[in-house]
Image: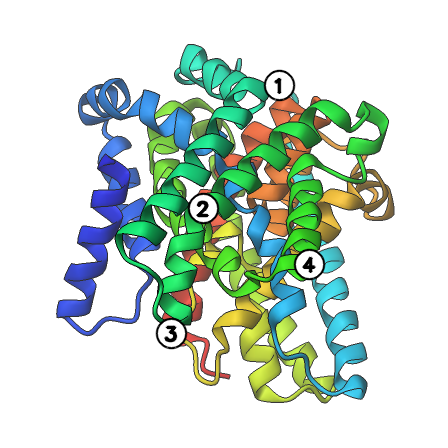
Amino acid sequence: MAFIMAERGTAAALAAFDSGMPASVVALCALGTLAAVPAAGAPLQLALGPAAAWLRAALPWLTAPAFLYPAVVVLPESDALTRLALFCTGGVVATCAVTGHVAAALAQTTAPPLAVPSAACAAAAAAAYTSLWTALSAMSLGVVATTALCRLRPPSDAASAAVARTPVYASLTFAFYGVAVRVLPTPLRAFLPPNVGSGLLMLSVCLAVGGLDEVRIYLLWLVQPAMVTLGLHSYTHAAVVAHQATRAVLALAVVSPALLFGLAWTGAAMGLAPAHIASVLPASTTTGLALTMPSGMPLIQREWVAAGTAFNSALTQCTLPVLLGATALSSKQPFSRGAAIGCTGHVGGMVALVAAGEMAAADAAAVAIVICGGVRGVLRCSGARL
């Protein structure tokens, strides 16, 4: 609740000043700056760490509806669609390769020991979110809530009907994620992570009974406060950040803007329309924060931001071993692999690394999401008028 209130409060303050900056980015940076001071970071982690662990653990199934966006957005004409797909695929490979190899060029031979913040809460959250009993309970609550909403205020239009159906769709997504975690065999998860499987199951249900429009919005709203929790990493991951300070500064000052503007110019050279480039560029060059940044760029289309992010995230998750091999990063240090996948595949990439047992790389991916995502978000909103 604290993170939701912080994100919503920041949004209200930015709206009062007519600012186009995403509230989640501003709140994340503010929390990160405050938590970086040890005297403030320790009590903040003690007070907010457990809630942050539960909210972060929910990110895999909270982002599952993003994989429904390609089915509901109006796609461009066929000739532009092919070039757009090539542009997005090339952006994934280029972001992964450039970020990973720049990090590897300055690699340290040793790494600080990993310390999982709020480990007990993180373990409890992971167990709860994958429990079949929790899934059944969530389904029951969703049905009861939807029934109660329909009886208390019978839907009179499409908007009110969407609100009434939201609880049952949310609980169904949660249940599908729990089932996917337990059913998918480990070898298959390397190419079909549980959150992708959950999204595909929800897509089949929505195509059969309707509800695509609301299901693609309700859980993604919670992604914004969940991303704010990453601000605590400036305290919990201080050893990793300090150890890799040179690479972090280089990513901040060189790699992020170079990829941002380089890919934009590449899209223009490919003959893509400015509206197409503006709408998919956030997903091509930033992190999971792209999902929370629907504004701040001329010609941008909100639906395409999430559709492009879903494409990049799904491509990274479903081809993780192949992507690392194709970019020659399989044998590099965990920090290099994590930085590359974190900047390329967003939160989904971090989830894929955890599923693959790459805990050190996942830790680096979390740091990369905060640093590169923050700077690219600021660049995109303030100076990316291409």
At horizontal 68% and vertical 27% (from top left) the residue drawn is 181
Quick one: label 2, few (<14), some, or many (20+) residues within 10 Å? many
Q: Earlier in the sequence, mark 2 or mark 1?
A: 1
Q: Earlier in the sequence, mark 3 or mark 1?
A: 1
The answer to whether residue 385 is above or below residue 254 is below
Residue at mark 3: 296
Does the CB distance between marks 2 and 1 fall below 8 Å? no
- The reply, left or right, for residue 192 in relation to residue 299 is right
At numbered mark 3, what does the secondary structure look like: helix, strand or loop?
Answer: loop
Quick one: label 4, few (<14), some, or many (20+) residues within 10 Å? few
Q: Earlier in the sequence, mark 3 or mark 2?
A: 3
At numbered mark 1, what does the secondary structure look like: helix, strand or loop?
Answer: loop
- The reply, left or right, for residue 162 in relation to residue 75 is left
Q: Quadrant of residue 230?
A: top left
Residue at mark 4: 208
Quick one: label 3, few (<14), some, or many (20+) residues within 10 Å? some
Q: Nearer the viewer, mark 4 or mark 1?
A: 4
Rendering coords of residue 36 (x, y %): 28, 32
User: What amino acid is labelled 2 in the image?
Assistant: Ile
At horizontal 69% and vertical 84% (from top left) the residue drawn is 76
In the image, 242 versus 160, the foreground residue is: 160
